[in-house]
Amino acid sequence: MEKIKALWVRYEEIIVYLIVGVLTTIVSWGAKFLVNALFFHNTMYPTPFENLVLSVVNWTAGVIFAYFTNRRFVFKSHEPMGKEIPKFVLSRVFTLILDTVVMQVLTAVGVHLIIATGISAVLVIIGNYVFSKLFVFRNKKA
């Protein structure tokens, strides 16, 4: 039990980030696939335009959910939100571009939408953690 406590203390931020990342992914994908079902007849091979719309919906839902959960549960920030939100959104713009490029390339070569979304999500989660840790929430009090 002591080893588990020690591991939790050492890796709490990463463990909680992964949990929040999974929840953010569920929220983002839920929004993405809802829009896909409502507007694009649930296509699994979207056009470039449909892909762009789905990526933007995915990103917007994720950013809104992720900012508040990362601030509160992962990085436990007490900085003014007005200072953090612009940095958070800017860092997520980069991963929106990453997601859009990855999705366009993968679906253009015939990768199924769900597989492409999973590959992109892994890359985006890693990028988001690095940006949040180094750029957005770096002033966390010990």
Image: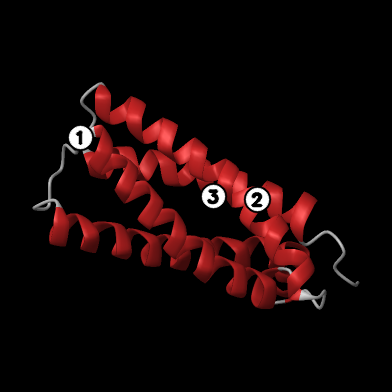
Q: Which residue lies most toward the left here? A: 41
For the image, the number of numbered tags is 3
**In the rendered image of this protein, does residue 130 appear above or below residue 66?**
above
> Residue 63 placed where, x, y %?
52, 62
* Residue that carries the numbered disc 3 in the rendered image: 125
Tell me if I can see residue 117 in this picture.
yes
* Residue that carries the numbered disc 1 in the rendered image: 47
Labelled pair 1, 3 in contact (Cβ < 8 Å) = no
Q: Amino acid at mark 2?
A: Leu
Question: With 105 as the anchor, is 96 left or right in this view?
Answer: right
For marks 3 and 2, give the CA distance: 15 Å
Question: With 120 as the anchor, is 124 left or right in this view?
Answer: right
* Residue that carries the numbered disc 2 in the rendered image: 90
Question: Image quadrant for the C terminus?
Answer: bottom right
Choose top left, top right, bottom left or bottom right for residue 47. Answer: top left
**In the rendered image of this protein, does residue 25 appear above or below residue 117?**
below
> Residue 120 placed where, x, y %?
42, 40
Q: Please report whichever mark, 1 or 3, sits nearer to the chain's N-terminal start.
A: 1
Q: Which residue lies most toward the top here? A: 109
Query: For this rendering, which residue is in front, 125 or 39?
Result: 39
Q: Secondary structure at mark 2?
A: helix
